[in-house]
Image (tube, rainbow, N blue to C red):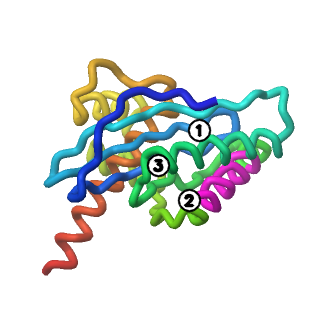
Amino acid sequence: MIQNSKLKIQNSETLRVLGIDPGTAIVGWAILDEIAGNVTAVAYGHITTSPKNTTAERLFEVVKDLEQIIEKYKPHEAAVEDLFFFKNVKTVMKVSQARGSILLTLEKFCVNIFEYTPLQVKQALTGYGRAEKKQIQLMVKNILKLKEIPKPDDTADAIAIALCHINSRKMREIKNNC
């Protein structure tokens, strides 16, 4: 089930980025537009799957909902959180399966894919790679001038991943122009 908020219109000079925080139970997603250095939140939300369903059914739900998001918002690029070390091997396996399904879906729709570790996301938003989750959430709220921190945490994480990509993209452009 997709849950979202906000919608704005895209123009021809807009870079539209889809940020994704992969998971099996909850996938956070965000659509951000960058126009002449200004970043705005277009839409954000989360995909939830039922724990009563099989892994295959849950992955299918994630893919189906992600396809709807891509078709509706037509992002140019996607930023997906890369996996980091999990203590629980069972959890990392399921997240890996969801992440693989997400990457395949993005590729199917010819969306350019960029991957960022949690460390890179934290550094891009706070300048500190070991920032706490609450610090990241507050930065997301402040950067986009939101009234409140997006919930659940997966949604705020997806916004942070998209912001990381936009900032990283700017740095790559500066470096390439030297």
Q: Which residue is mark 2?
A: 106
- Residue type (three-letter) at the residue carrying disc 3: Pro
The residue drawn where x is 68% and y is 47% is 95
Residue 116 counted in the magenta span: no
Q: Which is more foreground, mark 3 or mark 1? A: 1
Numbered range of the magenta stretch: 93-105
- Residue type (three-letter) at the residue carrying disc 2: Leu
| Mark number displayed over residue 66 | none
State left or right for residue 78 relative to residue 11.
right
**Residue 162: percent from left, percent from top:** 38, 48
Q: Residues within 10 Å of mark 1 (few under 14, many from 20)?
A: many
Could you tell me which secondary element the residue under label 3 belongs to? helix
The quadrant in which the C terminus is found is bottom left
The residue drawn where x is 56% and y is 59% is 106
Main SS of residues in magenta = helix
Q: Which residue is mark 1?
A: 27
Relative to 154, residue 172 above or below: below
- Locate residue 46: give its quadrant: top right
